[in-house]
């Protein structure tokens, strides 16, 4: 493959109202090409999407070994979850 | 020349140009410099085949002899094809394909944009859809021409040579004839002189960014628009039309 | 994300003791058994990683090489609609190859390495693409049989243990159904057409049937990797199970088409509720796998040519990107 074509991660918003989702990666020589490739590879069946491309080397990721430290505390904070609150049945849309 | 005949010929020029270009780009599938470019060129091919289907279907209706898109695509011989000569030129290397593409994308852009104001509302709506596609095509092809023109010494040399060799086919794009003047009179088709000025300016801008030199004008009066083609079209049609010719009347 | 994965390869060997290894392995297998997904930065046994790299890259190569037999008929498709559909299908296959290369790269191998392996002839790809497409009916047969077999293989992998591979397969399966329908529709049109078209369809079925059922790989008895791959949930069904399912599904379709499957021993077994079928000629399969099928050389030659002919293009794009970066740096300074 291309000697110096870096790897880009691709994020697509398939419909307005949704977030961008990570869909995969591709190689491109520059950012403009990366967007075009993303369009050709990941949006062949959709219109009106939004595409983000990011160089893979620019992504900072958490370490799975740190999972406990990063995420464990949230298990105690149960009041973030809607099921903590009892709402009378008569109240709609909550 | 009757207005109906002029419109039929004009629609064939647009439809056949898209068909022939779609066919040429289809030849690249599986052979492009990267898989990503393979997909990109295939997208272009699909767009052009789509344009051809809309335009040829309409052409058949205007003609009024019951010919549909496939009858026109597969059962006419080369002298009856009205594509611009540039479209039938062989792919050559990737750079040559890109040069051909930029010249034609810029032509289609001006043409389709002008046609969105056509008094023929069906043609206007086909043009509006095609214009959206052409915007993307132009971005793709001009982006690549810049990368190749302003890339390595080798890439620069290759595309400059392709540009020099294909330039003579650009004269035809804006040379008006009776078809054009008949249709310009009632607002169906645009005045070519205006389109040429804009095309020329856009090409200059792209070539400038690509560090390429615009070749001098070369007269070339053998125009595919009038059914006078190069030897390439005959071979292309022989390949394209083979099945329909070998099994006449069969449904596919 | 993935480049950091590349860095960590081998770190495990450096400072994990035997006890640590056993614990990591048990934790890993526990996740797999519980149908949890393994993601790129998770610890995994090296053999699991290598098996996946091999399987995913082979799958990717198959998609890319698979563009060639069908691409062969794009310029000769008999109607504009068929032409457009065929371009779209072949383009999908290229896209599938890309999803899979992308998934394989999360495991620490680069696209460049995988392409080199393919072009050097050291990587395998599905045997089926080493057969020639001789008539338009072959395009129908490929969609109906080859894509049909591929779907049968692929759907279970949507639930495989490795996240990126499973997600790529979900995406692929969504796009695949149109491929098989397209192929079957071509066969149907031919079968209901002129006598020459019917003969064309039967001839294609005669040539593509056995290679298609060979796609499922050697019989379970002679398949080395199956047991371990099933423990790791990379493989969910055995070769023979999938092959039987394919034949059971496809034989009635051939009947509907009014075409004859070229297997005189094919018959419905009321007791087992399956179709019985004849012996597969594994010598042909072995020959094709070893590089001596009808088109192995041509397929690799075509891919090598595309790669070599395109080298100046890729270099130019990289050079231009460097120039742009340098200009931007100067402008900012």
Image: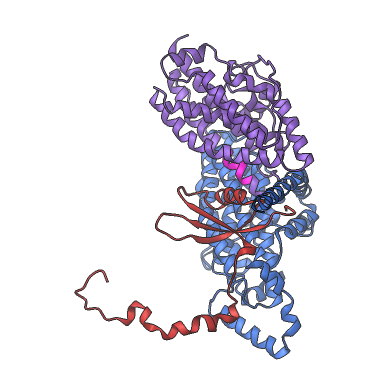
Chain colours: A red, B purple, C blue
Image location of residue B96, percent across then percent down: 70, 34
Residue situated in front as seen by the camera: A56 or B17:
A56
Q: Residue furthest top?
A: B1
Q: Is residue B227 left or right of residue B128?
A: right
| Percent position of residue C117, x then y | 77, 58
- The image position of residue A63, as x and y in percent, is 60, 77
Nearest the viewer among B3 and C193 is: B3
Q: In the picture provided, is C161 more to the left or to the right than C219? A: left
Residue in the image at 70% along x and 74% along y: C8
* Residue B211 falls inside the magenta stretch: no
- Corner quadrant of residue B212: top right
Q: Hey, which residue is sitting farthest left in the picture?
A: A90
Q: Is residue B83 above or below residue C104?
A: above
- The answer to whether residue C219 is visible is no
Task: Judge by depth and name the residue closer to the eye, B14 or C152.
Answer: B14
The residue at the far bottom in this view is C19
Looking at the picture, tell me which residue is in the foreground, C86 or C310: C310
Left/right of residue C158 with respect to residue B209 in the rendered view: left
> What type of secondary structure mainly makes up the magenta span?
helix
| Numbered disc total | 0
Is residue B43 located in the magenta-colored stretch of the structure?
Answer: yes
Q: Residue at x 65, y 73 (%)?
A: C229
On the question of residue B109 being in view, the answer is yes
Q: Residue at x 65, y 67 (%)?
A: C2
* Residue A58 position (above or below residue B210): below
Q: Which residues are magenta?
A: B38-44
Q: Is residue B102 above or below residue C330?
A: above
């Amino acid at each position: 493959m291309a000697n110096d074509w870096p790897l880009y991660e691709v994020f697509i918003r398939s419909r307005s109202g949704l977030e961008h989702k990570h869909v995969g990666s591709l190689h491109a020589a520059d950012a403009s090409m990366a967007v075009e490739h993303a369009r050709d590879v990941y949006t062949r069946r959709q219109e009106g999407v939004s595409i983000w491309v990011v160089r893979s080397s620019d992504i900072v990721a958490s370490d799975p070994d740190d999972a406990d430290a990063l995420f464990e505390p949230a298990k105690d904070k149960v009041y973030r979850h809607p099921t903590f609150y009892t709402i009378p049945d008569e109240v709609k849309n909550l | 020349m009757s207005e109906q005949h002029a419109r039929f010929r004009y629609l064939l020029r647009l439809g056949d140009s898209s068909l022939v270009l779609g066919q040429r780009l289809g030849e690249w599938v599986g052979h492009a410099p990267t898989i990503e470019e393979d997909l990109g060129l295939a997208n272009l091919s699909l767009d052009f085949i789509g344009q051809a289907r809309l335009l040829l279907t309409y052409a058949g209706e205007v003609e009024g002899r019951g010919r549909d898109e496939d009858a026109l695509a597969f059962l006419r011989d080369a002298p009856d094809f009205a594509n611009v000569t540039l479209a039938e030129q062989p792919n050559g290397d990737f750079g040559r394909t890109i040069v051909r593409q930029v010249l034609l994308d810029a032509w289609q852009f001006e043409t389709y944009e002008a046609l969105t104001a056509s008094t023929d509302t069906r043609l206007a709506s086909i043009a509006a859809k095609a214009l959206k596609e052409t915007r993307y095509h132009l971005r793709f092809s001009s982006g690549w021409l810049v990368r190749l023109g302003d890339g390595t010494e080798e890439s620069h040399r290759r595309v400059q040579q392709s540009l020099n060799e294909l330039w003579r086919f650009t004269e035809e794009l804006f040379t008006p004839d009776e078809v054009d003047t008949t249709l310009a009179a009632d607002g169906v088709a645009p005045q070519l002189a205006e389109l040429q000025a804009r095309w020329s300016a856009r090409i200059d801008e792209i070539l400038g960014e690509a560090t390429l030199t615009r070749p001098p004008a070369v007269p070339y009066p053998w125009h595919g628009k009038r059914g006078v083609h190069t030897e390439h079209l005959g071979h292309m049609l022989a390949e394209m039309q083979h099945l329909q010719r070998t099994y006449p009347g069969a449904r596919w | 994300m993935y480049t950091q994965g590349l860095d960590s390869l081998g770190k495990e060997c450096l400072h994990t003791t035997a006890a640590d290894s056993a614990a990591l392995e048990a934790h890993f297998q526990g996740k797999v058994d519980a149908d949890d997904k393994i993601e790129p930065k998770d610890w995994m046994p090296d053999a699991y990683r290598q098996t996946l790299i091999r399987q995913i890259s082979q799958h990717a190569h198959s998609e890319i090489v698979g563009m060639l037999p069908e691409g062969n008929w794009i310029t000769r498709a008999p109607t504009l609609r068929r032409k457009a559909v065929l371009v779209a299908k072949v383009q999908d296959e290229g896209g599938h190859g890309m999803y899979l290369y992308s998934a394989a790269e999360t495991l620490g191998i680069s696209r460049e390495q995988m392409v080199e392996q393919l072009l050097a002839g050291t990587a395998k790809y599905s045997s089926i693409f080493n057969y020639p497409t001789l008539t338009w009916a072959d395009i129908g047969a490929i969609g109906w049989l080859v894509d049909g077999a591929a779907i049968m293989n692929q759907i279970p992998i949507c639930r495989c243990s490795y996240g990126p591979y499973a997600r790529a397969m979900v995406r692929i399966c969504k796009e695949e159904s149109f491929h098989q329908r397209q192929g079957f529709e071509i066969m149907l049109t031919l079968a209901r057409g002129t006598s020459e078209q019917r003969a064309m369809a039967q001839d294609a079925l005669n040539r593509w049937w056995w290679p298609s059922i060979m796609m499922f790989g050697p019989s379970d008895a002679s398949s080395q990797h199956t047991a371990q791959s099933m423990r790791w949930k990379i493989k969910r069904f055995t070769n023979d199970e999938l092959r039987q399912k394919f034949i059971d599904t496809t034989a009635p379709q051939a009947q509907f088409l009014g075409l004859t499957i070229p297997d005189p021993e094919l018959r419905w077994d009321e007791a087992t509720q399956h179709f019985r079928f004849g012996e597969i000629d594994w010598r042909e399969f072995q020959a094709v796998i070893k590089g001596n099928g009808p088109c192995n050389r041509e397929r690799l030659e075509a891919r090598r040519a595309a790669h070599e002919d395109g080298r100046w293009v890729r270099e130019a794009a990289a050079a231009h990107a460097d120039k742009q970066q340098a200009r931007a740096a100067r402008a900012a300074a």
